[in-house]
Amino acid sequence: MTSGSLRTRLLLAGGLGLILVSAVATWWLGAMFERSARAAMDQRLGNELIAVLALAESDAQGGLQLRRALSDERYQRVFSGTYWQVQDAKGQPLGQSRSLWDDTLLTPATLRTGPAQAYDTTGPLQQPLRALAQQVTLPRMSTPLQVVVATDRSELDAQVSAFRKRTALALAVLIALWFAVLVTQVHYGLRPLSELGRIAGQVRNGEQVRFPQQGLVKEVAPLAAQLNDLLDHHARMVLRARRSAEDLAHALKTPLTVLATEAESEGSDWRQTLRSETARMQASIERYLAAGIGADSQQRTPVAPVLASLCGLMQRVHVGREVSFHYDPDAQGLFAGAREDLEEMLGNLLDNAGKWAAHRVEVTVAHIGNRMRIDVNDDGSGLPEDDLARALGRGVRLDERMPGSGLGLAIVADIAESYGGTLALRNGHPGLRATLTLPAG
């Protein structure tokens, strides 16, 4: 299905709906009018049937006669379209109106003694008739009689047809008016989206930084908020990539200096230096390029398997210091992001805690609504309060005796920020506590 204009879709759907509703309304109103008109005609025929029965009596020979003629002159005019007829149960005529002349009316084969039965039939001139028949037994008569009264329904059919046409014409006019209202409604209803598109153009051209949520209708305001979140996410990704490039340049500076120095020297061990420094540069490139990849919030990563792998690795890395790493293997945390990013963040935090811990590093995981909190605690000496904020700076090394570039905690903070999370440090007495807050799956 090809995409098209939302305005066209709404107008097409609304127009088809109006036509469908109008067609159903025309049919329904016509059917109701026809039903009402037929009911009124059946009621008049019922009165005529009662009048015939009231005047009918049996004569001395058991035949049928009317005490007097019906007052309606249409029964006297030949083929007038109004008729009555009386016959026995076998269909033998016993009496009829002059208007029938020498013709007879058909009666339903299912006619039995009981309530009158209405039906459609044809008259002497093949005109459509509406008839009412009833089977009754008169006093002093041993056999039942079938009494039929009928009238021409051509006028009724013409009235129904005219009513349907007038109704269709009236509804066609209403459709035109309703469609004009629909066009106005769609145009007015889509104005907030047009305004949002205009603001998007201003944001793209740099005239605005964000989508303002004030002044937008409440149905569009959440969309503006989501677009602002998308802009924030894009800004975080750009900042993360820029910082990753800066970190890579910083990490490559020392190996390049070593290689430049080695090139100027006359030492014979330049091959070993070249191998070690190029390996160091390759590792830095892979690490910081991976850190610069945009956050993928669509992935879901269980925390427990990552902790199990990293704690086992750190146990071997820091085996010489006899530091133990502990975590809850049943932790139910689910990170809304890529496994590589979670490994990068937790790997840096665990490695940093392992360097400064006295004997123990402990990791806890907790869910708070749609966020998750990971605490990495060590039992070391902690940091002076003035150094807690500085520790997250890029390239800051608070103790030059420890190996490293001073970028580990800054990288963790950058990755967490790219997911809308945070990294905070505080003294735990004893030791240092690093709290990582991330979106939960």
Image (cartoon, helix red, strand yellow):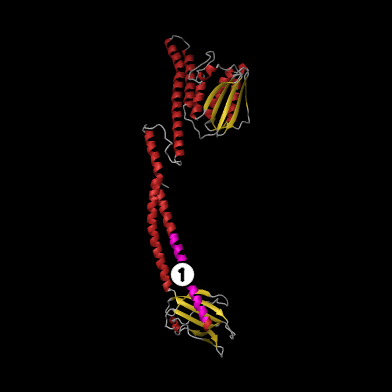
Task: Say which residue label 1 marks.
Answer: 37
Magenta stretch: dominant secondary structure: helix
For the record, the magenta segment spans 23-52
Decide which of 237, 113 is in the foreground and name it: 113
Instruction: Mark yes or no: residue 152 visible.
Output: yes
In the rendered image, the residue lying farthest to the top is 266
Vertical position of residue 245 compared to residue 273: above or below: below
Residue 52, horizontal then vertical, whole percent = 51, 81
Instruction: Mark yes or no: residue 348 visible.
Output: no
Residue 377, horizontal then vertical, whole percent = 60, 22
* The quarter of the displayed image where residue 82 is located: bottom left
Circle 1 — which element?
helix
Residue 109, horizontal then vertical, whole percent = 54, 77
Decide which of 149, 301 is in the foreground and name it: 149
Vertical position of residue 24 compared to residue 408: above or below: below
Is residue 51 shown in magenta? yes
Tell me the crowding category of disc 1: few under 14, some 14 to 19, or many 20 or more residues within 10 angstroms, Cα based: some
